[in-house]
Amino acid sequence: MAGRTWIVIALGSVAFSLMAVNLVLATRLPGVDRAFRGLDQVYWVHKWLGISILVLAFNHQYFKIATDGLQVMQEISKLAITVAKVSFYALLFLGLISFFKRVPKMPKITWEIPYGWWRQTHRLFGLVFLGIAFHQFFVKAPFDNNAFLATYLNVVALIGSAAFLYTQFGFLLRRRGFKVVGVEKHPAATIVDLAPKGRGLTVRPGSFAFVSFSTKGLGEPHPFTVSQVRPDGGLQFSIRGLGDYTKRLRDAIAVGDSARVEGGYGRFHHHSGGPRQIWVAAGIGVTPFLAWADHVRPDDAEQITMIYCVRNPEEGVALDRLRAAQERVPGFKLVLHCSDTDGRFDAAKLVSYLPFEPASASFWFCGPAPMRDALLKGLKALGKTPGSVHFERFEFR
């Protein structure tokens, strides 16, 4: 084959392979979670693989294969070429929807694609993959299906197709039934308590789960951090109204509603953080720390300082549980930073709250990414970079 033809085939083959990888990542299989040290890391890789796929597919389509006069005679091969063209434009359209989920920063524009719409369009990537798999299996020019490359791509097609089917139906094996037994509309969050209807889930403090409700408009599974894990299998979620789904949940959820829960996911667990730890929670970012604080014991060796940043005490969620942990555990210190009275929270104030040097501690953060970046930049400027940094990359609304 000509050099250009090989390049074009390589572009398409790599794009197709990466699509299969992305479909495997979307299965949320436990092994995938562990391999990437958390589902947030999986989704971060998933995002950048998706961008790479768009670039590769665009170049594959733009340069095209030089057939050197070969004609595609079989009708099914012609159909395969047509399917590939349709799949390419569908891939481009869906990719742009994912890339521009939120309208870029423009004056007076705050609209974003609702989470439910975005999720449904995102599921169509699997159908696009099936279309491309059909194309590569039946297209005959310039190589046939007996070639080594075609055999490899057929294996990739089977793996990706199986992963897609698992994402669509595998949840039936993973979800458990729960009942809403409590709803508290706190000024800063909607606190929802769930009790298992039968066999519950194994969820570690600090993990998150995908939750859907029987309530109209809340049927889409949505990820929330578990803010409390009870001995009887009950779970609590503290949810702030940051987007269309979570705002609707605050108005619609009620005691007695049914829920389906899948989890727990994530590797945000402080026990791997060493003897000195800094916990920084901003706003509703307190949720994993609440579950952690419930489970710290008086004989734990860790020396922990938790800084909870809110505008005023009224915004603090479950402060009684955090204060109870402070009274129960000698090594646990709680600092409530109220910006209305204490001013802006920055690296210098963080250091002033600590009974130890940040460089000797692990830093655990949950809150807005700009705040996290500013704190780490400030600590570096002060020469007090933490020994390790832990956070999760999530943005669901």
Image (cartoon, rainbow, N blue to C red):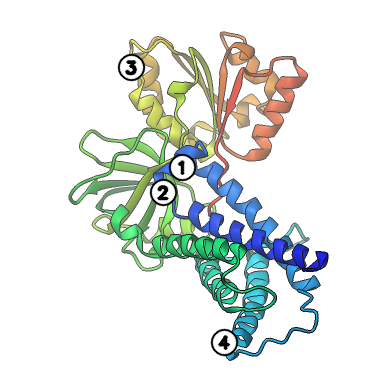
Dot 1 amino acid type: Asp
The residue depicted at 50 percent of the width and 31 percent of the height is: 313
Where's residue 386, x and y in %? 63, 18
Mark 1, residue position: 33
At label 4, the amino acid type is Ile
Mark with earlier residue (4, 2): 2
Residue at horizontal 69 percent and vertical 33 percent from the top? 373
- Residue 29 is tagged as 2
Disc 3 or 1, which lies upstream in sequence? Answer: 1
- The residue under the point 60% across, 86% down is 79
Nearest the camera: 244 or 51? 51
Task: Give the crowd class for mark 1: few <14, some 14-19, many >=20 residues within 10 Å.
Answer: many
Instruction: Give the label, 3 or 4, closer to the camera.
Output: 4
Type of amino acid at the residue the image marks with label 3: Arg
Q: Secondary structure at mark 3?
A: loop
Are dots 3 and 1 in contact, CB under 8 Å? no
In this view, the residue in front, 143 or 397, is 143
Frontmost of labels 2 and 3 is 2
